[in-house]
Image: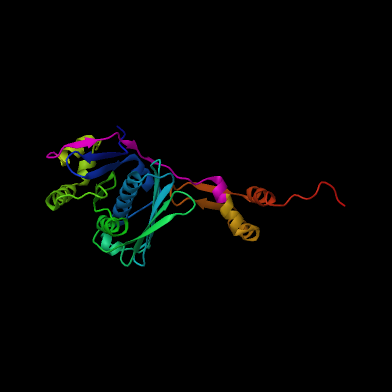
Amino acid sequence: MSADSITPFTFESLPVRGALIHLSRSWRRMQRNHDYDQATAETLGHAAAATGLIAQSLKFDGAITLQIHGSGDLKMLVMQCTSDLDLRGMAVVEPDATAINFVELAGNAHCAITIDAGERPYQGIVAIDGESLSSSLEHYFEKSVQVPSHVALVANEHVAGGLLIQQMPGQTIDDDDWNRLHILAETLTSGDFAGDAGIDLIRKLFAEDDVRVFRSRSVDFCCRCSNEKVEDVLKMLGQEESRAALKDQGEIAVVCEYCGRRRSFDAVDVSRLFSNNVVAGPDSVQ
């Protein structure tokens, strides 16, 4: 089994489904070329695990984006996951940030979850009303999606992981059983994901239950930046502004905020870029 994976499962005697996500290689790649402080890295890891879990729980062909915007130390966080479980994400924090936990980092923030699966994307707003991203997402599932859920998220510099447990739509579960599952989910720690967390961890967590575990799906870090997209940005900037930047700096350097890849454009590149924008004239002059 891949170390970066999502493993879905169901309970045989309870109307509950769930999934466990384990990110290591892709999570470390996401942090490369960034110097995140501990609170920001932990929040970004939680967002990576949560977005993957949400994407896995949906039947769609497209991408889901989780965005957090605030007026505190965390200015913006973006996490995207496709239906193929290709994941990328980044965060922007004030240079003099002093936050040491999620509450301080995401103060006065709101979270938007956008599902783009066709012509009309669906967006839901998540209120950051608890002490963690997981509690805010639980509120979102219950109020906006009307699916009672338990969400547990963990992250350190090496791994990010999480657990999503949801009641089956239209079915009820005894409160004692539901609370018991919540307590078990809350016992998850980063240490549980030190190895290949999957079937063994699920069975360890829910040892008293009959659990049916399904085939794991691989998760990969994949940035969708490209030369063409960067060139489109320069075209939107315009020829005059591009040449002014080129004159001041000698080249135009564009760095992807997701993967950190640096692309450089010199005078020849800029000339080619805008000459390609010229509308072709007639074959002959009247």
Q: Is residue 215 magenta?
A: yes
- Percent x, y of residue 40: 32, 56
Between 170 and 116, which is closer to the camera in this rendering? Answer: 170
Residue 272 versus residue 241 in the image, above or below: above
Q: Residue at x 16, y 38 (%)?
A: 204
Whether residue 245 is visible, yes or no, is: no
| Residue at 78% in and 50% down | 281
| Residue at point 27%, 57% (across, down) | 142
Is 17 on the left or on the right of 54, as rendered?
Answer: left
Q: Residue furthest right?
A: 286
From this viewpoint, which residue is outermost toward the top? 1
Q: Closer to the camera, 161 or 241?
A: 161
| Residue 18, horizontal then vertical, whole percent | 25, 44
- Look at the image and tell me whether residue 180 can be seen: yes
Q: Is residue 212 magenta?
A: yes
Query: Where residue 215 sits: x, y (%)?
Result: 29, 33
User: Where's the N terminus, which quadrant?
Assistant: top left
Q: How many marks?
A: 0
Magenta span: 207-230
Q: Position of residue 87 (x, y in %)?
A: 39, 45
